[in-house]
Image: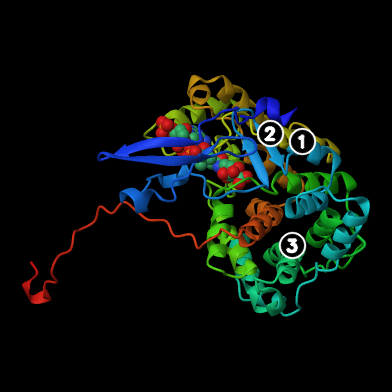
């Protein structure tokens, strides 16, 4: 698909400013145009010129930054990483190629790819003392709680890559994050099931190595299934980056204070954990299990439409996609491939998911609100079939999204115009009043 035909292009002669009149004062607010997609109203001087703030809780109409990394056309259901459509990257490339693209802006030559793979591979081990952090957790701790802790702890080990003003240190920190997050994630899984940690194997590629660290045991040889390794790699590509989503915005905001990259990524992991965001894959699988059989789908669709019922269809809807999430389509295809490879016929959860999708996409409520399956709708079924417990699903999302977070963090740190993020507010609390001694309070 040619991105420009389906994506809002800046029309020739678009207006260069919007005119605002406030209490008799006329103000021209510059309109800035991107290469594709919506233009922006530059309100940076609004408060200085009018004493007014803009008001946009949830940032539904707010661009927080300028970026060249990822672009989503929500109406067309299009996702571009540095201009390349996600389906082409998922089809033809591998996850480390996507990492290189997101970090440096161009697809690598074969020599660049080989060197990048070598660098990441050689950074997959973590300091041996990192393993001691795990024994401080309960075995049944949620692995996302463990990841928040151990990723943040990386900043205690890598003082040689926390000076964010040094481009060399920024690069080594980026490589370390991409390389070590899978190792820490696999350790969180092994710890939760009481099995010994498995060291990275440099002879394996990124995703095969991750599966080996998760599923190999010391007492017998483990052979990584190449179909599952390819599926894992594709799942990582699909989850790698996604514009200024909640967790990426968290990483940018944390990074804007000058915090080190490891601490910023730990903040991103904490935000991703929420069920409205990265936690939706875990919640979606639980929901499919709760529905149980295709004949119960109607009841749950009714609940999802009931304003008085807090129940929502997890894995459905999206702030930006008002069309089918292109990642969900590839996820669905991957789901079928994995189930076929594992010989899993008519998985009851898949049957419920297919029935739910069929009914919801024909239902007036979902059509009117433009609610489609998102990436989390099919990922849970796939990951469960691959052997991951539900609690690990968001951890896998975090492993993939680490490259997006670090690429966006790097772009922000290298942006000469970046300043500390510090939003204002609409204050509706008590006006100034005198202190009342406790003896006089009624
Ligand atoms: C991810 O931002 C990203 O890019 C995120 C992500 C990424 O890659 O980083 O794509 C990953 O987080 C995907 C989204 C995963 N979350 C879920 O699947 C949870 C279920 N979805 C919803 O919670 C919701 O759709 C959100 C959070 C995804 C989007 O929320 P918005 O944009 O704030 O939309 P909204 O809550 O204002 O909903 C608009 C309307 C509402 O009805 P009205 O108030 O207008 O009457 O649609 C309804 C909502 O009630 N609605 C749903 C629904 N999602 C929205 N109704 C039923 N089921 C749903 N899932």
Contact between marks 3 and 2 (CB within 8 A): the answer is no
Residue 108 seen by the camera: yes
- Where residue 366 appears, x then y in whole percent? 51, 25
Q: Are marks 1 and 2 in contact (CB under 8 Å)?
A: yes
Q: Position of residue 85 (x, y in %)?
A: 74, 36
Give the mark nearer the N terminus: 3 vs 1. 1
Observer-side mark, 3 or 2, equals 2
What's the residue at 75%, 70% (across, down)? 168
**Sequence-wise, which precedes: disc 3 or disc 2?**
3
Separation (CA) of disc 3 from disc 2: 28 Å
Q: Name the residue under label 1.
A: 87
Residue toward you, 331 or 39: 39
Q: Looking at this view, is 113 or 150 the one in front? A: 113
The residue that mark 3 highlights is 186
| Front disc: 3 or 1 | 1
Q: Earlier in the sequence, mark 1 or mark 2?
A: 1
Q: How is the image coloured?
A: rainbow
């Amino acid at each position: 698909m040619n991105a420009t035909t389906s994506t809002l292009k800046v029309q020739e002669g678009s207006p260069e400013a919007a005119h605002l009149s406030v209490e008799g004062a006329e103000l021209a607010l510059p309109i800035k145009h991107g290469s594709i997609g919506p233009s922006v109203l530059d309100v940076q001087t609004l408060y200085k010129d009018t004493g007014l703030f803009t008001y946009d809780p949830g940032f539904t109409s707010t661009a927080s930054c300028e970026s060249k990394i990822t672009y989503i056309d929500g109406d067309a259901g299009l996702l571009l990483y540095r201009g390349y459509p996600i389906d082409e990257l998922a089809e033809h490339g591998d996850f480390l190629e996507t990492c290189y693209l997101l970090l440096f802006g161009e697809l690598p030559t074969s020599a660049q790819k080989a060197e990048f793979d070598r660098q990441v591979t050689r950074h997959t081990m973590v300091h041996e003392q990192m393993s001691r952090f795990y024994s401080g957790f309960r075995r049944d701790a949620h692995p996302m709680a463990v990841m928040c802790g151990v990723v943040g702890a990386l900043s205690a080990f890598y003082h040689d890559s926390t000076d964010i003003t040094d481009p060399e240190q920024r690069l080594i920190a980026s490589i370390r994050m991409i390389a070590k997050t899978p190792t820490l994630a696999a350790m969180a899984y092994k710890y939760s099931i009481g099995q010994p940690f498995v060291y990275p194997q440099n002879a394996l590629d990124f995703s095969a190595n991750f599966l080996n660290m998760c599923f190999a045991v010391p007492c017998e040889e483990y052979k990584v299934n190449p179909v599952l390794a390819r599926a894992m790699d594709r799942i990582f590509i699909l989850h790698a980056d996604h514009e200024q989503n909640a967790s990426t915005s968290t990483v940018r905001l944390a990074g804007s204070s000058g915090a080190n990259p490891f601490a910023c990524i730990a903040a991103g992991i904490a935000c991703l954990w929420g069920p409205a965001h990265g936690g939706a894959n875990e919640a979606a699988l639980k929901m499919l299990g709760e529905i149980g059989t295709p004949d119960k789908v109607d009841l749950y669709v009714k609940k999802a439409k009931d304003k008085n019922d807090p129940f929502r269809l997890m894995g459905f809807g999206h702030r930006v996609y008002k069309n089918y999430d292109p990642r969900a389509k590839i996820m669905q295809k991957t789901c079928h491939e994995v189930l076929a490879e594992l010989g899993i016929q008519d998985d009851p959860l898949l049957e419920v998911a297919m029935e739910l999708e069929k009914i919801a996409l024909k239902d007036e409520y979902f059509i009117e609100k433009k609610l489609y399956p998102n990436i989390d709708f099919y990922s849970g079924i796939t990951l469960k079939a691959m052997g991951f417990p539900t609690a690990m699903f968001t951890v896998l999302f975090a492993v993939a999204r680490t490259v997006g977070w670090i690429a966006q963090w790097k772009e922000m740190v290298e942006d000469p115009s970046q300043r500390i993020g510090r939003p204002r507010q609409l204050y509706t609390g008590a006006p100034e009043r005198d202190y009342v001694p406790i003896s006089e309070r009624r």
